[in-house]
Image (cartoon, rainbow, N blue to C red):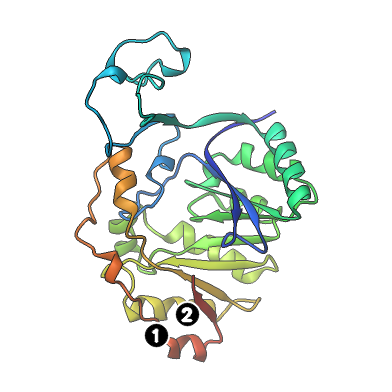
């Protein structure tokens, strides 16, 4: 039985696959995107999330405690009178989690999506979880930065795969995410040659990857897909910075005013290459 680390389970999600779904978020990601809206999912280990708004500065959470679940965190999870201190990261058994999710999916007539972080960072756990879900409609959301064999094996077990494409230029991709994009492009090409249903997702970040040249290159790339190519654009999330504050992590895009952001998609190349797209 494989064990893995998750940091959230969201019920009744509507943008992670067909119908109403349950989305499981696995901890750990090989990328460090400047805009990541789940910073608590980047590291594989358990970590603190502290809400500063409403803090009384009483210091109770800093006092030593004997709770086993608090050891190694430097804070007591139970002392805050307003409940502002919590830990994210839970070890779960793949078979047990699959059984629980399958029962829930059957009750709600819904599906299960595995996201992150990056689900392929825990490949054995991911594959056992997907196997355990059996006939449940499943999907994964992945950045694609993983070994081709792991990517292929996971893709073959789901009804839909969502692949994030951050930037088409590898050098720019490295600046924005910390890694080059060649492994991602190889896995995209694997999908383009095959029969596995997939959708490309692009998080639109003002001034970083939302220019017409980058988005047009994506349309041209997808024109060679065996299946009809589909793209979903994800507008910038203006509330991301608050999570970084909770996770006690620096955020470098605080200068972006996402509330005033209205992305413009270069429609002509998408029509020319027959790529279906929408903004979520």
Identify the residue at image location x=27%, y=71%.
Answer: 260
Residue 40, by quadrant, is: top left
Local packing at callout 2 (Cα closer than 10 Å; few below 14, some 14-19, many 20+) is many
Disc sitting over residue 219 in the figure: 2
Compute the Cα span from label 2 to label 1.
Answer: 10 Å
Residue 182, position as x, y percentages in the image: 43, 60
Name the one closer to the observer, 274 or 252: 252
The residue sitting at 29% across, 17% down in the picture is 60
Q: Quadrant of residue 191?
A: bottom right
In the image, is 184 to the left or to the right of 47?
right
Given this view, does label 2 or label 1 mark the residue nearer the observer?
1
Look at the numbered discs 2 and 1 and tell me whether their residues touch, using CB distance below 8 Å: yes
Q: Which element carries disc 1, helix, strand or loop?
A: loop
Out of 176 and 114, give the one closest to the viewer: 114
Q: Which residue lies furthest to the top in this view?
A: 66
- Residue at point 65% right, 51% down? 154
Q: Which residue is label 1 attached to? A: 266
């Amino acid at each position: 039985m494989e064990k893995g680390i998750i940091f959230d389970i969201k019920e009744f999600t509507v943008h992670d696959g067909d119908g109403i779904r349950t989305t499981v978020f696995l901890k750990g990601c090989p990328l460090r995107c400047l805009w990541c809206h789940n910073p608590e999912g980047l590291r594989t280990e358990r970590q603190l999330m502290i809400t500063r708004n409403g803090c009384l500065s009483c210091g109770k959470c800093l006092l030593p405690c004997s709770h086993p679940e608090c050891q190694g965190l430097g804070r007591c999870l139970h002392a805050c009178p307003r409940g502002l201190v919590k830990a994210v990261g839970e070890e779960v058994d793949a078979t047990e989690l699959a059984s629980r999710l399958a029962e829930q999916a059957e009750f709600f007539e819904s599906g299960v999506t595995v996201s992150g972080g990056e689900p392929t960072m825990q490949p054995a756990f991911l594959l056992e979880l997907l196997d355990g879900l059996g006939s449940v409609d499943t999907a994964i959301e992945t950045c694609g930065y993983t070994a081709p064999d792991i990517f292929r094996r996971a893709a073959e077990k789901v009804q839909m795969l969502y692949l994030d494409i951050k930037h088409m230029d590898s050098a720019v991709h490295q600046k924005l995410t910390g890694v080059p994009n060649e492994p991602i492009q190889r896995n995209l090409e694997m999908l383009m040659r095959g029969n596995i249903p997939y959708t490309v997702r692009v998080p639109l970040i003002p001034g970083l990857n939302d220019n017409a040249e980058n988005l047009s290159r994506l349309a041209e790339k997808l024109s060679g897909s065996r299946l009809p190519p589909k793209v979903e654009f994800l507008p910038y999330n203006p509330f991301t910075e608050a999570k970084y504050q909770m996770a006690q992590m620096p955020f470098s895009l605080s200068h972006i005013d996402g509330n005033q952001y209205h992305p413009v998609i270069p429609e002509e190349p998408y029509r020319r290459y027959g790529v279906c797209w929408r903004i979520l």
